[in-house]
Amino acid sequence: MNHLTYKKPRICILGCGNIGALHAKNLQRRAALYFCSRSRVSAYKFNLKFKGEGIFDDLNALLESDVDAVVIASPPEHHKDQVIALLEAGKAVLVEKPMCISPEEIVEIETVLERVETPLLMIAENYYYKPSLSYIKHMLTQGDIGEIRSVSVKKLTTQQAQGWKSAHGALLEGGIHFIALISDLFDAVPEQIEAIFPGSSGSTPERESLVRMVYATGAIGELHYSWQTPSLTKGIFQHSYIEGSHGRIVFESNGIYIRKPQKGFRILWPGLKDLMGYRAMTDDFLSCLQNRSRQPYSDFARAKRDLKIVFDAYACGV
């Protein structure tokens, strides 16, 4: 990149809560930032804190502006309408996961993507960019454990579903990260999905799920995800496993470390500086803004694949 000619993109953060602050921190000094929120006070505070260029009072003002891109960090039930409006206004969009909250909304977004010229829609699925996942995929490509037979991922802890999070299931809100991880390892759509939701009454969103995915090769992906299981370590230092035809990979579920499949006991620390992948994800989005012929790794097609697994699990689960 020629830093003498590089012009910072104009990016608005839509939604000034904790997630909006995370994106603002990652984009600060790399973009000219603007802010928009249901609370004008919140937008004003963010503009001061992150040395922004200004605020917008509402979505309509943002749509009519000359900003290049918008980061949607609002509650999920607003995502679909905001994504569609912004794409139709010619804005590049980075939307927080989940991209939307129903199969019908996926179809609506896809219809707009097919109609809009050179759209840029990226989903903020940071797990795709985690150093641990990149290293595991490298090990699999090198044939360290042969063909994948099964992937078993576990993340069990307690988490309060407060505010807008109380309206949605834990699998859709948080488990989607691990669905994305499993999907990326298989790079395929499962042919069969089974799901159990322990303790779910049906009258309130689920807080625990066991999802089983069967792929065309016969390989199996399993996820056990919970917001209602006490954990002394707060969900840290729980292990997940990848079984291959001649070996096994063990990794800490959050990606802190990986055990190499070889004789002896060797632990790898793949990248603590960007453990959650936010920096690499931000880099990808900015690169796509700089070169609009590029598409992000965390694109619509992958989000559609991952969300379909979640929605199918809800449809068939007990």
Image: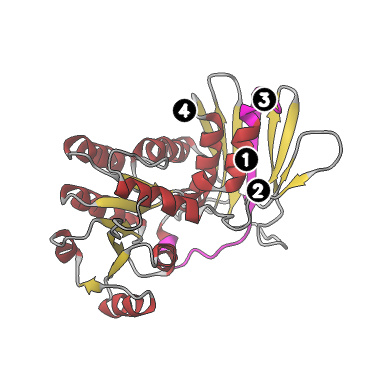
Q: Nearer the viewer, mark 1 or mark 4?
A: 1
User: SS at mark 2?
Assistant: loop
Q: 32 or 263, which is in the foreground? A: 32
Q: Amino acid at mark 3?
A: Gly
Q: 93 or 243, which is in the foreground? A: 93
Is residue 160 magenta-colored? yes
Between the residue at mark 3 and the residue at mark 4, the CA separation in whole angstroms equals 22 Å
Q: Amino acid at mark 2?
A: Pro
Q: What residue is at 56 percent from the left and 62 percent from the top?
A: 159
Between the residue at mark 3 and the residue at mark 1, the CA separation in whole angstroms equals 13 Å
Q: Indicate which disc residue 135 carries.
A: 1
Q: Residues within 10 Å of mark 3 (few under 14, many from 20)?
A: some
User: SS at mark 1?
Assistant: helix
Residue on which disc 3 sits: 143
Q: Is residue 21 visible?
A: yes
Residue on which disc 2 sits: 270
Mark positioned earlier in the residue sequence (1 or 4): 1
Q: What residue is at 84 percent from the left and 42 percent from the top?
A: 265
User: SS at mark 3?
Assistant: loop
Highlighted magenta segment, given as a residue range: 140-165
